[in-house]
Amino acid sequence: MLTIATGNKAVAAAVKEARPSVIAAYPITPQTEIVEQIADYVTGGSLDSRYIPVESEHSAMAACIGASVTGARTFTATSSHGLLYMHEMVNWAAGARLPIVMANVNRSLGPGWNVWAEHTDAFQERDTGWLQVYVGTVQEAYDATLMAFRIAEHESVLLPVMVNLDGFVLSHIMQSLETVDLGDFIPPLRLPHAIDIEHPRGYGTLTGPDEYFKFRWDIERSMRDSVRVIEETQKEFGKRFGRSYGFTEDYRCEDADVLVVAMGTLGKEAEVAVDNLRKEGVKAGSMRIRWLRPFPELDIAGRDVVVIDRDYSFGWGGVIARSLKAKYRVEPFSVIAGLGGQEVTFDDIAGFVRDREPGKEYWFGVNA
Amino acid sequence: MTEIPKEEYILKCTSACAGCSTSLILRYVLKAAGRDTVLVIPACCTSVIQGIYPNTAMNIPIYNVAFAAAAACASGMSEAFSAAGKKTNVIVYAGDGGTVDIGIQSLSGAFERGTDFLYICYDNEAYGNTGMQRSGATPIGARTTTTPGGKIHAKKDLDGIVAAHNPPYMATACSAYPQDLFKKVQKALSIRGPKFIHILAPCPPGWRFSSEKTIEMGKLAVKSGMWLLYEREYGAVTINGPSKAAMIKPVPVEDYLAPQGRFKGISKEALAMLKSQAEKSAKRLKLEADGVC
Ligand code: SF4
């Protein structure tokens, strides 16, 4: 069905389609609309889920953990300080190998209070064992949420998945949305370690160094396996519903001399910049990173790279720029832009490309 | 006499200290609850008592979760079981620290939402698992490793806080009265909604008494009126036999404190506070039981 929706409503619609049996959530700007919409579905009877209106995000993830370990499909949504408040349980969910799906509406962190888009919130959860995908459109928010359930629950993954969408610029703007009839795209969840009264087990008990170490390796092994599962899932999604996705979304990259690497809505904005640059004779391309974990293989060797980070690791640098430098031994032009919802237009992005200085870090709009 | 089942759900070879009443309480709680039960525990002595991976001393599923999260985790579990049409008992078994301090938010949330579960707080009046630091449940005057001069703040009124949530059933119990404890757990599990049992758990290393005196310490707590046994069903208070007797003819509080190293050298003021608090609690409870307030 073709309709128009905000990013938040698109996520809620996908959740309705995926039918989790337990949803536990706490409202926070700009995620609020997701949980309001879900509450409305449940109250109106169009979604047969238990909705637990918890008293905090820490409890939201704890409730999802409790439900998930019984073998139930679970969902929650959060943003910014909510995600940070949940941090302890975010780790727990991955360590406990529970396929929880969470939407995170990317927002900056205080102080000062700022409710606008930034990726720093989710980046603080990079090392928890969650898979993380970043979307660029309303349609993609919907599609990625659906695929997240299937990927998380796959027997070779069994790790939680976080779907990230930019606050306001995506959560609150309307775009066209085509919803799907899911059919059997997401099979019933069979959790091999679900609580079983007939076979009592101790979950999360005290664990010595050797066994603990093996558990960590097991998470990493599943992360590596998830690459194949993500590829298969995205391919099948394309076959069934006509929209296909990759680890990155590459726009006019094949013959490009200079690549703009960004995430989320800035990655989409970069496509317009690329079109305009091409008109000027600059052979530019946009490579939007979708999956942050597992981190993708990028075809960037031998080209100029302009990285736009809507994040920052203080005392270190833009996270994506630094990651590419470490992984591919390139010298990107590292642009820090869009923090706290700073407006970055396609003209600005074209400017970054024109004025690039490989190896330099540039804070957009700030006298650095 | 209540028939107590022979089945054991906490097996031998636990890692509890000698004379630990917490493991004794757990034994009776699980006998009363039966096989179709899941235990949710935050960080607490039971994290150790259950044994070390890949082994377990528990004969029922036991889910370990982060310190502040037990009641919320149980909320999710209870809803998921009920959505799947299962009747499985969900029991939080948490120490005083995980209950009165770090876990009180999630406890309050789960009670406010009417979660169908039983929350048991076994109260050894300190952070026993980590070597006896003060908790909000440590009584005034008690020495712990973080209150080496004796605690200067009164014990938090956990039962008052829980009662304010109006759960259908709440009770207190003590490890020295296992029959009473067993019956209360059974009754609690027969009622839908959030239930709460607060159980005094005398702790030999923490309270500094010799380990063969565990039962005696529990009895002295009740007989001196320092621990009151009662139930609150749909708001109506019943004081149980041993506490009724203690209200008429209590043994001196000093008899309860003297064998405990933690109260050695307690100040006159702290002692007077302890006594007056116990008297006030008893008086208030009696008025409630008599239907006066
Ligand atoms: S510290 Fe006390 S409560 Fe904890 S296991 Fe030892 S005796 Fe039991």
Image (spheres, coloured by chain):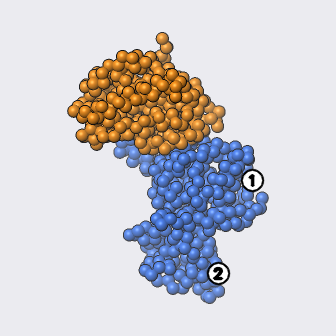
Chain colours: A blue, B orange
* Residue B15 visible to an observer of this rendering: no
Q: Position of residue A181 (x, y in %)?
A: 75, 53
Q: Residue at x 32, y 33 (%)?
A: B273
Q: Position of residue B212 (x, y in %)?
A: 28, 21
Mark with earlier residue (1, 2): 1
Q: Residue at x 65, y 53 (%)?
A: A36
Secondary structure found at label 2 = helix
> Which residue is outermost to the front?
B292
Task: Give the residue at mark 1.
Answer: A181
> Which residue is outermost to the left?
B265
Q: Nearer the viewer, residue A182 or B109?
A: B109
- Quick check: is the Cβ at mark 2 less than 8 Å away from ligand 1? no
Q: Quadrant of residue B75?
A: top right
Q: Nearer the viewer, residue A247 or B16?
A: B16
> Which residue is outermost to the top?
B1
Q: Position of residue B126 (x, y in %)?
A: 34, 36
**Dot 1 falls on which chain?**
A
Q: Nearer the viewer, residue B217 or A157?
A: B217
Q: Position of residue B74 (x, y in %)?
A: 53, 38
| Amino acid type, label 1 | Asp
Secondary structure found at label 1 = loop
| Amino acid type, label 2 | Asp
Neighbours of disc 2 within 10 Å: few (<14), some (14-19), many (20+): many
Q: Is B223 situated left or right of A297 in this image?
A: left
| Numbered badge on residue A210 | none
Task: Give the residue at mark 2.
Answer: A275
In three-dimensional space, the C-alpha distance between marks 1 and 2, rounded to whole angstroms, equals 34 Å
Label 1 with label 2: CB-CB less than 8 Å:
no
